[in-house]
């Protein structure tokens, strides 16, 4: 987002109970610590930014971000590493979509196969700089890729819920070119938090806004 002519960031925190938006001039981990106020979820889902690491007991790296990188490498790389990773991620997404309907033993079997096949991909040599960089990122995130398998139906393989919650604000920024003051961005974030959290319980946005104003 843009605030007072400066670059700023809109953070979105999602759980089963609430969706919280906040605007800040930094992407530092202190923003997360201030919002969480000592709370540590069982599983934290985010991308690979350093500031978004270490906030939960376990971590699920957003596979959608890695999938975009794998597709880029598949298109522009000089070997098949990107294609192999893309196919591996397709299998992981397929498992994530059907995981709530599968027996625990079946999920464990799929997870073992995915871990084995990923190991084979990571062990392969490559002379492609793009592929080498992506393999390095995946090696560092390896223990965070399949956390969703241990929380069937409760943990997503992506942070798409946060991405969807962010879209109205992105459209707002593109239409208005940002906010003239920090208080306006904070007010927008508070409104989004109120409406999005209310939606979790099936409440209508307009009625929620009227209730918040009345209160």
Image: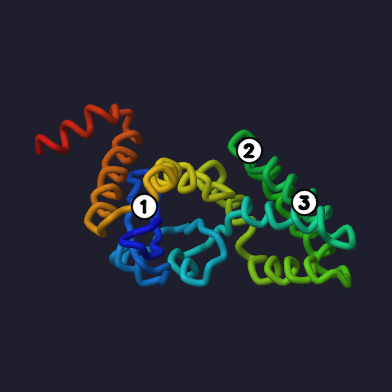
Mark 2 burial class by Cα count in 10 Å: few <14, some 14-19, many 20+: few
Mark 1 sits on what residue?
A: 178
Residue furthest toward the left? 215
Say whether residue 113 is left or right of residue 10.
right
* Residue 156 drawn at (x, y percent): 55, 47
Residue at disc 2, secondary structure: helix
Task: Determine the CA span between mark 3 and mark 1.
Answer: 36 Å
Say whether residue 52 is left or right of residue 146.
left
The quadrant in which residue 66 appears is bottom right
Visual colour scheme: rainbow
Which numbered disc flags the more N-terminal residue, 3 or 1?
A: 3
Q: Quadrant of the N terminus?
A: bottom left
Numbered circle sitting on residue 86? 3
Task: Determine the CA span between mark 3 and mark 2.
Answer: 16 Å
Q: Nearer the viewer, residue 179 or 62?
A: 179
Residue at disc 3, secondary structure: helix
Residue at x 67% of width, y 44% of height: 93
Residue at x 30% of width, y 45% of height: 193
Mark 2 sits on what residue?
A: 97
Residue at x 74% of width, y 70% of height: 133
Which numbered disc flags the more N-terminal residue, 3 or 2?
A: 3
Task: Determine the CA span between mark 1 and mark 2.
Answer: 36 Å
Residue at disc 1, secondary structure: loop
Relative to 113, is 123 above or below? below
* Residue 21 drawn at (x, y percent): 34, 51
Residue 27: in sight, yes or no?
yes
Say whether residue 167 is left or right of residue 82.
left
The quadrant in which residue 213 appears is top left
> Are circles 3 and 2 on residues that touch, CB within 8 Å?
no
């Amino acid at each position: 987002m843009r605030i007072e002519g400066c670059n700023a960031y809109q953070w979105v925190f999602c759980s089963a109970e609430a969706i919280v938006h906040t605007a800040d001039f930094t992407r530092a981990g202190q923003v997360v610590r201030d919002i969480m106020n000592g709370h540590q979820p069982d599983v934290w889902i985010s991308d690979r930014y350093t500031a978004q690491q270490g906030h939960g007991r376990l971590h699920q790296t957003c596979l959608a971000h890695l999938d975009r990188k794998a597709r880029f490498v598949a298109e522009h790389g000089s070997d098949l590493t990107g294609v192999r990773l893309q196919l591996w991620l397709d299998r992981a997404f397929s498992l994530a979509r059907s995981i709530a309907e599968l027996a625990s033993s079946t999920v464990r079997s799929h997870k073992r196969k995915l871990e084995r096949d990923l190991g084979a991909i990571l062990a392969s040599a490559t002379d492609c700089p793009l592929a080498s960089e992506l393999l390095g990122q995946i090696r560092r995130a390896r223990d965070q890729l399949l956390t969703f398998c241990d929380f069937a139906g409760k943990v997503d393989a992506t942070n798409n819920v946060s991405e969807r919650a962010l879209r109205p604000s992105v459209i707002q920024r593109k239409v208005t070119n940002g906010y003239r003051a920090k208080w306006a961005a904070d007010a927008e974030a508070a409104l989004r938090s109120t409406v999005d959290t209310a939606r979790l319980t099936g409440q209508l946005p307009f009625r929620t806004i009227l209730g918040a104003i009345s209160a």
